[in-house]
Image: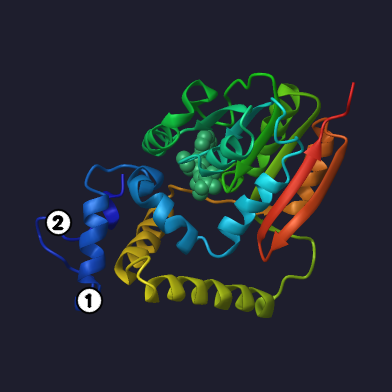
Amino acid sequence: MVESGRVGSQNGPTRESEASQEVVAMIDQTEADDSTYFGSVAESYDRLQPIVAGPGYLEGLTMMVDLVPHEREEAFRFIELGCGTATLSCRVLERFPRSTGIGVDSESAMLDVARKKLASYGDRFHVREADVRTCDLPACNLVFSSYAFHHVAPEALHGVLARIADALKPDGCFVLLDQMKARTPWGARLAGQGRRIHQQHVAAAIASGKAAQAEVDARWEFKRRMKSDGQDVEYVHVAEDILDEMLAAGFNEAGLVWRRFASTILVVFMPGE
Ligand SMILES: C[S@@+](CC[C@H](N)C(=O)[O-])C[C@H]1O[C@@H](n2cnc3c(N)ncnc32)[C@H](O)[C@@H]1O
């Protein structure tokens, strides 16, 4: 899959400088089974993602749990789309002891981590290996998704949103967190501000020993190579366009409720009975 970009093969390293040898070795190690990006990062995902994804990642997840429109003792059924290691589901199950849910993801290695992590919730949570663009969704009260919709192409958005709307019961709610543009003039200076804060966040995590510079570099490099090989494509959606699509899909109340630079939360509701 990523053979064309690999170094350290039988002929030995060719293009990388001395300084990057450690990073290259780590990349070769993670690519050894020719797996996907998320397959390769699954084991370190929970430790590294809050660092490399920037400060909006954990803040966004915390806000999503706060936004769940149910009382603590209420019983409700949820689906997490693109759940990865299911950190969000874990937090919801913890906060709402009578909730039950399903986590859907196409990457088995991420789901393996999720299964182990959430084993103590027993029958309250199940994972399903499936593509969110095509899978059937059972009836539920709440759907949420964090940092997965940027993997869905704009032309597939309507279909996914329509199936979420179909699955949700009256008054059901969909909470979406992801990186999005907004229809405001977003220039180089604003982008620079965001980058600076992100870099400070990563540097602080490395300085405190939460991650090594080499493993952070290895993750960026692996991602860059997959993208240059045409894999792990990421789309930049515009928040207001998604809100329009949500209304067109059958939701009747839709709003942008939280934003930290590009990390954005949209909340939408289905009409009541
Ligand atoms: C950046 S991770 C986010 C994981 C988790 N939601 C979180 O916030 O940490 C993106 C996840 O979306 C999954 N994913 C991407 N495209 C998908 C698709 N078409 N169907 C199902 N899962 C998908 C990936 O396997 C990965 O686990």
The residue that appears at 66% across and 62% down in the rendered structure is 262
Element under disc 2 = loop
Q: Residue furthest bottom?
A: 189
Task: Name the disc covering residue 17, or none.
Answer: 1
The image quadrant of residue 163 is top right
Could you classify mark 1 by the number of other residues whose Cα lies within 10 Å: few (under 14), some (14-19), or many (20 or more)?
A: few
Q: Which residue is mark 2?
A: 9
Q: Amino acid at mark 2?
A: Ser
The residue that appears at 51% across and 72% down in the rendered structure is 201
Q: Is residue 150 above or below residue 219?
A: above
The residue that appears at 45% across and 34% down in the rendered structure is 118
Task: Please identify the quadrant where the N terminus is shown.
Answer: top left
Residue 204 in the image, given as x and y percentages of width and height = 45, 75
Closest to the observer, 219 or 96: 96
Query: Does any portion of residue 129 appear in the rendered image?
Result: no
Closest to the observer, 170 or 246: 170
Residue 182 in the image, given as x and y percentages of width and height = 75, 60
The residue that appears at 57% across and 44% down in the rendered structure is 148
Q: Is residue 33 left or right of residue 185?
A: left
The image quadrant of residue 109 is top left
